[in-house]
């Protein structure tokens, strides 16, 4: 009897852990998958989330410092009209604090530091010539006007969708502006928004992204995408944004979330789906693929997904992004009258923010490494990247910037289950032909992820909205 107990009972327990029969199998424990599960749980449906990583959160990740504080390696900002992420933070008892914007920003141009007041009559534009400011303002106004014409739920239905999708954003921009200063500022803005160069996304995709930067009562604008106060970079979450995922996962129950379970196959048989990873097999009536299209395309589906869905996943790449965070004993740049925000025409990091926590127990400057700059560093050692980052910060803020306590580096391009960020974007020809398949279910396989959201595509808010949409689709079938 002792031998039976020691062999059979552990086997049965292992089978219970690895052989699950539920209403819904969710692939991915980022905010979209967790939001799906939240609404399913509220409706009394059973679910299992299979997550490839050893943690929840997806492209939302906290870096824990020795002093007990955190910095965000992934998504970190929230702002007005991002209703769903703000509602989730409130529901979880999380608080926010404003991004630091007091003082002067810096334009680093032609090896020259030019401080400027971000709230000048120029609308916050850096101190370039009035001709360049006028060009840029006119371009932004035209993009906003075109974006307002789109149906955020189906931008591919616009009469000019095929035309706009046939051209790159770069070709459109260069037909409107001619000055190098105008191009610099616009290119820097696009890298900060999509982590691409302007020749990579189509005009239609960019217009849809602008249209999505709002909600049902506030139309999207490019200013809302690039701005801080009252815009996308308005505030941060005390304790770091990964708390949105970890706190929600705790409420959903750890027994319902299987970590270290990368899904290899989704197979339909006898009216149900078998979802399989290395050690886990889940049987479910519905499946939610809560991950980016390119990563979703790496799963084997039986039967095959519709050809157009497969074409979409083959053609929709991730942006290229990394983050570098320099830690200092205090935010000394504030004493010099700077707010920590920089736009630069050179260097590894070309856009920075003051990332000091609300406690002000230390100072932090965060810099984005984006698009071509990120790709050029994919094979470079982190030690060398840290040297380059310090060099950039010294150029921007002076020799005091070299006195770092620590430099944190996260390269999302090299992260196995992300392979880039912050979002998968649409090159020319993608959205007008295959856009409907971003959200169109395949049988009872449903697609979530921030790329599928009509509002705040590419942001945490969009991820949560996508999960809520998919949950509603599924509950309508029960």
Image (cartoon, rainbow, N blue to C red):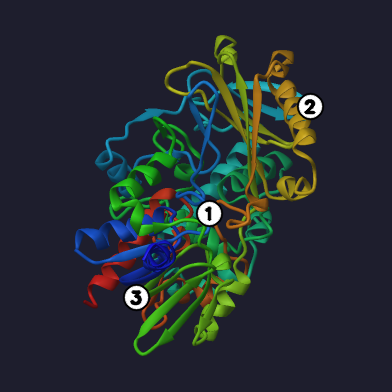
Q: Residue at x 33, y 67 (%)?
A: 470
> From what the image shows, is residue 304 above or below residue 313?
below
Q: Secondary structure at mark 1?
A: loop
Label 2 or label 1, whichever lies nearer to me, is: 1
Q: Which percent across, then down, holds residue 389?
A: 73, 30
From the viewer's side, name the closer residue of 247 and 448: 247
Q: Check the image and name the residue furthest to the top.
A: 335
**Residue at the front extreme, as displayed:** 1
**Looking at the image, is mark 3 or mark 1 earlier in the sequence?**
1
Residue hosting label 2: 111
Are circles 3 and 1 on residues that touch, CB within 8 Å? Answer: no
**Neighbour tally class for label 3: few under 14, some 14-19, many 20 plus, Cα within 10 Å:** many
- Asked whether residue 401 is in view, the answer is yes
| Rendered-image quadrant of the C terminus | bottom left
User: In this figure, which residue is indicated by the disc labeled 1?
Assistant: 53
Residue placed most toward the observer, 215 or 265: 265
**Disc on the earlier residue, 2 or 3:** 2
Question: In what quadrant of the picture does the N terminus appear?
Answer: bottom left
Res 89 → quadrant: top left
For label 2, the crowd category at 10 Å Cα-Cα, with few meaning under 14, some 14 to 19 and many 20 or more, is few
Say which element carries label 2.
loop
Q: Position of residue 142 (x, y in %)?
A: 51, 53
Q: Residue at x 27, y 66 (%)?
A: 46
- Residue ID for mark 3: 286
């Amino acid at each position: 009897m002792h031998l039976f107990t020691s062999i059979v009972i552990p086997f049965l327990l292992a089978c219970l852990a690895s052989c699950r029969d539920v209403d819904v199998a969710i692939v991915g424990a980022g905010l979209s998958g967790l939001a799906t599960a939240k609404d399913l749980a509220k409706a009394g449906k059973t679910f299992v989330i299979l997550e490839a990583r050893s943690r929840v959160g997806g492209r939302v990740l906290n870096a824990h410092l020795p002093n007990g504080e955190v910095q965000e390696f992934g998504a970190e900002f929230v702002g007005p009209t991002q209703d769903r992420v703000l509602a989730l933070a409130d529901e979880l008892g999380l608080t926010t604090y404003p991004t630091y914007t007091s003082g002067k920003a810096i334009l680093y141009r032609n090896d020259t530091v030019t401080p400027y007041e971000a709230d000048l009559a120029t609308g916050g534009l850096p101190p370039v010539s009035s001709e360049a400011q006028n060009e840029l303002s006119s371009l932004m106004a035209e993009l906003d006007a075109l974006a307002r014409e789109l149906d955020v739920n189906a931008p591919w239905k616009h009469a000019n969708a095929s035309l706009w999708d046939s051209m790159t954003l770069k070709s459109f921009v260069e037909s409107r502006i001619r000055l190098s200063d105008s191009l610099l500022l616009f290119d820097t803005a696009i890298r900060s928004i999509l982590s691409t160069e302007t020749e990579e996304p189509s005009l239609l995709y960019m217009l849809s992204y602008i249209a999505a930067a709002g909600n049902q009562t506030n139309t999207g604008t490019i200013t809302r995408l690039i701005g801080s106060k009252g815009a996308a970079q308005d505030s941060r979450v005390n304790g770091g944004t990964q708390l949105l995922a970890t706190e929600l996962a705790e409420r959903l129950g750890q027994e319902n979330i299987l970590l270290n379970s990368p899904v290899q196959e989704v197979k339909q048989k006898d009216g149900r789906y078998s979802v399989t990873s290395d050690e886990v097999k889940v049987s479910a009536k519905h499946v939610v693929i809560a991950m980016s299209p390119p990563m979703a395309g790496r799963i084997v589906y039986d039967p095959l997904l519709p050809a157009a869905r497969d074409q979409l996943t083959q053609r929709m790449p991730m942006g290229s992004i990394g983050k570098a965070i320099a830690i200092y004993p205090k935010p000394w740049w504030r004493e010099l009258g700077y707010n920590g925000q920089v736009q630069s025409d050179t260097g590894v990091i070309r856009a920075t923010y003051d990332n000091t926590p609300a406690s002000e127990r230390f100072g932090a400057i965060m810099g984005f490494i984006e698009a071509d700059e990120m790709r050029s560093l994919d094979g470079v050692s982190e030690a060398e990247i840290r040297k380059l980052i310090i060099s950039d910060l010294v150029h921007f803020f002076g020799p005091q910037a070299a006195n770092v306590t620590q430099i944190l580096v996260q390269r999302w391009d090299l992260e196995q289950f992300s392979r880039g960020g912050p979002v998968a974007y649409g090159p020319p020809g993608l959205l007008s032909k295959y856009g409907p398949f971003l959200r169109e279910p395949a049988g009872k396989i449903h697609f979530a992820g921030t790329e599928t959201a009509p509002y705040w595509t590419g942001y945490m808010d969009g991820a949560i909205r996508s999960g809520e949409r998919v949950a509603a689709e599924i509950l309508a079938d029960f």
